Image (spheres, rainbow, N blue to C red):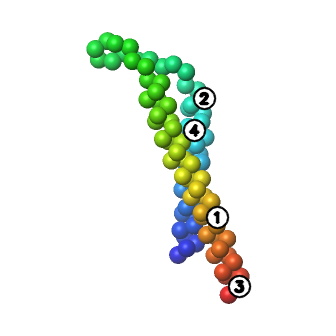
Amino acid sequence: MFMQLAIGAIGIGVVLMVGYIVVAQVRSALPTSLQYQNASGALVSASADINTGLNSTQATVFAGFGLVAVGIIVLAAFGLINVFK
């Protein structure tokens, strides 16, 4: 059971690492100042909103790195337990 959990954690972490690469590429590709026109015709700056979204997405991806680390630790512990049985 622990082995399946560890493998699942590593799998989720790998997916989130790919997400990190995507977020980093999007962040570098976006212009520094981005504006759009709202319904009333006023220009609104979207840079703060985009940075907030990218930061929260990156925080989720960093949690994936933690899942990979926990998965590796659990797999190593599982292997050691089986060696010393």
Tell me how far mark 2 sits from mark 1, CA to CA: 31 Å
The x and y percentages for residue 76 are 67, 71
Please, what secondary structure does the residue beneath circle 3 have? loop
Q: How many angstroms separate mark 3 from mark 2 (CA)?
A: 49 Å
Could you tell me the amino acid type at mark 3? Phe
- Give the label on residue 72, or none: 1
For disc 2, the marked residue is 28
Label placed on residue 22 = 4
Q: Secondary structure at mark 2?
A: helix
Separation of marks 4 and 1 at Cα, in angstroms: 24 Å
Mark 2 and mark 4: Cα distance apart in space: 10 Å
* Side (left or right) of 27 relative to 44: right
Look at the numbered discs 2 and 4 and tell me whether their residues touch, using CB distance below 8 Å: no
- Disc 1 marks a residue whose amino acid type is Ile
Above or below: residue 65 compared with residue 23: below
Instruction: Identify the residue shown where x is 71% and y is 85%.
Output: 84
Mark 4 and mark 1 lie on one chain; the one further toward the N terminus is 4
| Residue type indicated by callout 2 | Ser
Inter-mark Cα distance, 1 to 3: 18 Å
Label for residue 84? 3
Quadrant location, the C terminus:
bottom right
Give the secondary structure at mark 4: helix
Query: Label 2: few (<14), some or many (≥20) within 10 Å?
Result: few
Q: Local crowd at mark 3 within 10 Å, few (<14), some, or many (≥20)?
A: few
Locate residue 51, reporting x and y percent: 50, 31
* Position above or below: 40 against 46: above
